[in-house]
Image: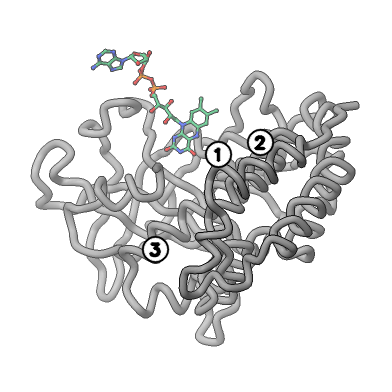
Amino acid sequence: MTVYNAPVDDMKFLLNNVLGMESIAQLTGYEEATPDMVDAIIDEAARFYGEVLAPTNKAADSQGSRLEGGKVITAPALDGIYQQIVEAGWPGLTGDINYGGQGLPALLAVAVDEMSQSANMAFSLCPMLTKGVVTALSLYGSDEQKQIYLYNLVSGTWTGTMNLTEPQAGSDLAAVRTKAVPSGDHYLLSGQKIFITWGDHDYTDNIIHLVLARTPDAPEGVKGISLFVVPKFMINDDGSAGERNDVHCVGVEHKLGIHASPTCALSFGDNDGAVGYLVGEENQGLIYMFAMMN
Ligand SMILES: Cc1cc2nc3c(=O)[nH]c(=O)nc-3n(C[C@H](O)[C@H](O)[C@H](O)COP(=O)(O)OP(=O)(O)OC[C@H]3O[C@@H](n4cnc5c(N)ncnc54)[C@H](O)[C@@H]3O)c2cc1C
């Protein structure tokens, strides 16, 4: 069993005496990040990630995730853990208060995320990717997209993924071939992405994919890549998850040390085309995606 005791004294010392948490707490909007509050959050995070998540690490890695009948089966050792993390409010710790987050300084998440990643790296990639989607949509999404997606992503009710890589396009994203054809108020996407971290699972009733693709008249190379938001399930008018979108997991890789993380091959548009919505402007997708990657 993995034992993880977070170095809480060192973390508190760094936050308070080196990195200036107290002066950050003087800034407008961060008044709640008082030394007592910060200490209490660090203590509780250490307990939670040390006692709840770390014991899952070894068993979950041995069990791994797999694809069965088109469904991703996650490691049994992780059953119920994601729900506990959402109930405890950890995903929204530093999220925007306008979208249900707790609005605490990002510096605090540096310590808390280190605990999560030290306790179980494979698992922690899931909330990490979701935070990246929140960042990209907060910066570049339309007001409507923010309303539809951000509340559920900030709280962790839904998770998010990053879809850049294709079989012929790894470091060289100029080679991205996934297509996005305009169709009314949306686009229809088709193509295959590989190595998509937590690309599918059933922890949540929806997964929000951010996907790089090319529109029909796009320029060659990285100047012709656009960014689309593609939900696993279409969103009903009341905001709930509806009909299945045309994006499916077709394979799960085996990655040393992170077998519990479903690193997926995702196929978009095998049937009618995966419905996607443009983020920002066409051909600016790589710039937007860098906000997520960073
Ligand atoms: C565990 C895991 C999770 C991942 N999760 C995601 C994800 O969630 N979403 C996603 O989109 N992708 C994901 N990826 C894919 C990752 O982004 C790619 O693996 C990465 O971009 C490299 O691409 P590649 O594997 O095709 O390697 P290549 O691009 O083929 O590179 C192979 C080697 O060649 C070198 N190389 C490449 N080009 C050059 C050059 N021009 N000059 C010199 N050297 C060069 C590279 O440095 C590397 O050493 C994941 C990968 C892994 C392993």
Q: Mark 3 or mark 1, which is nearer the start of the sequence?
A: 3
Give the label on residue 197, or none: 1
Q: Which residue is mark 2?
A: 261
**Is disc 2 surrounded by few (<14), some (14 to 19) or many (20+) residues within 10 Å?**
many
Query: Residue 43: percent from the left, percent from the top?
Result: 81, 51
**Residue 266 left/right relative to 257:** left
Ligand 1 is within 8 Å of the C-beta of the residue at disc 1? yes
Q: Nearer the viewer, mark 2 or mark 3?
A: 3
Residue at point 43%, 60% (across, down): 230
Q: Amino acid at mark 3?
A: Leu
Please name whichever residue, 57 or 20, is drawn nearer the observer in this view of the structure.
Answer: 20
Q: Are marks 2 and 1 in contact (CB under 8 Å)?
A: yes
Q: Mark 1 or mark 2, which is nearer the start of the sequence?
A: 1
Image quarter for ligand 1 equals: top left
Residue at point 32%, 47% (across, down): 212
Residue at point 82%, 32% (across, down): 4
Q: CA distance from mark 1 to mark 3?
A: 18 Å
Q: Which residue is mark 3?
A: 137
Ligand 1 is within 8 Å of the C-beta of the residue at disc 2? yes
